[in-house]
Amino acid sequence: MALRRLQLIRTLHRASGIHESSYLFGSYRRYSNVASNDPRVSLGSFSSYLYKSQNALPWTSGKTATLRSTMAAEWSISMNVKRSAATQVKAPAQARQMGALQVTISSPGFIYEPYAPREPISFWQRWFTRSGWRRTKDDIILELKSAYAISKLRRKGHSKKEFYNEAANMYKEINTLVANGDKKTLRKAVTEKMYSALKNEIKQRESQWSNVHWELVEPIVKIRTLRARLIGVDRKDLEKVFVQLTLEFLAKQKFEAYDSNGNVVAGDKDKEVLVRDIWVFEKSLFHQGAYWRLCGRLPA
């Protein structure tokens, strides 16, 4: 009887150990599902995250269970992002066979979890229905990912003010280069995939209009961060990551297009138009001399 009890205790101990490690190294969605079903992590612990807006969370202190879930979420998010990128950003098969060859990745070549506005829901639905609880949990996960990426940027010495100034200059520069058709200079300001898209855009525009006038009315009305994400490229080195920041620009612009005879065919350069753009900027955090580049534009 004593031997059977001892074997049962060992079996339960091994099972609990495997289950615990699966929470730590599994995806955050899997972790959060466990947390929501665990009686120690009650829905009350999430009630402190009251929204000031639909896309922003005030980071207030909660119960111990919430703190533990946040710490585990941060580590789990990091591992999940690294694992996800490792399966998507791979070297060519021939390069992988040559162990001595080191392949440098200048850009992942995709936007990780593109931003899309969340449909607003009522306070009653959010806190008193199962679908609302699931939605609140998903919103918290999205915010935790952004908070983790931004905290990593800050640890690297980046500041919000400096980045916004740089982003505003890049917004003006890239729009001007596209308007002037300066593809040579444009190549340095954007990623390879984005350059291909802009080059085709310039070619299509030049087939319709001879040239265009574009002007930014400074200062930019508003810049805000919508999302931040990390993309890892090496499972063994968690410092080898790219960061992507999704920004919203609200700016006044002037535009006018001309045909080959110099006649105005579209726009009016004397009128200011309020334009909303959503751009995604990318930077490597492990390449020396790396700088911010435009890697994508999203529907506004």
Image (spheres, grey):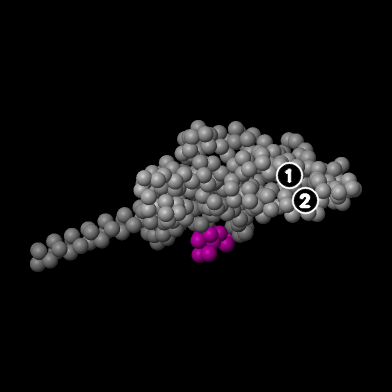
Main structural element of the magenta stretch: helix, strand or loop?
Answer: helix
Q: Is residue 126 magenta?
A: yes
Q: Amino acid at mark 1?
A: Gly
- Residue at image location 81% in from the left, 43% down from the top: 213
Q: Amino acid at mark 2?
A: Glu
- Residue at image location 63% in from the left, 51% down from the top: 196
In screen coordinates, is 6 left or right of 120? left
Residue closest to the eye, 197 or 275? 197
Which residue carries the number 1 mark?
181
The label number, if any, that marks residue 206 in the structure image: 2
Give the spatial CA distance, label 1 vs label 2.
Answer: 8 Å
Q: Could you classify mark 2 by the number of other residues whose Cα lies within 10 Å: few (under 14), some (14-19), or many (20 or more)?
A: some
Are dots 1 and 2 in contact, CB under 8 Å? yes
Residue closest to the eye, 165 or 282? 282
On the image, the x and y values in percent for residue 258 come to 85, 48
Residue numbers of the magenta segment:
124-135
On the image, the x and y values in percent for residue 83 come to 42, 53
- Residue at image location 49% in from the left, 56% down from the top: 137
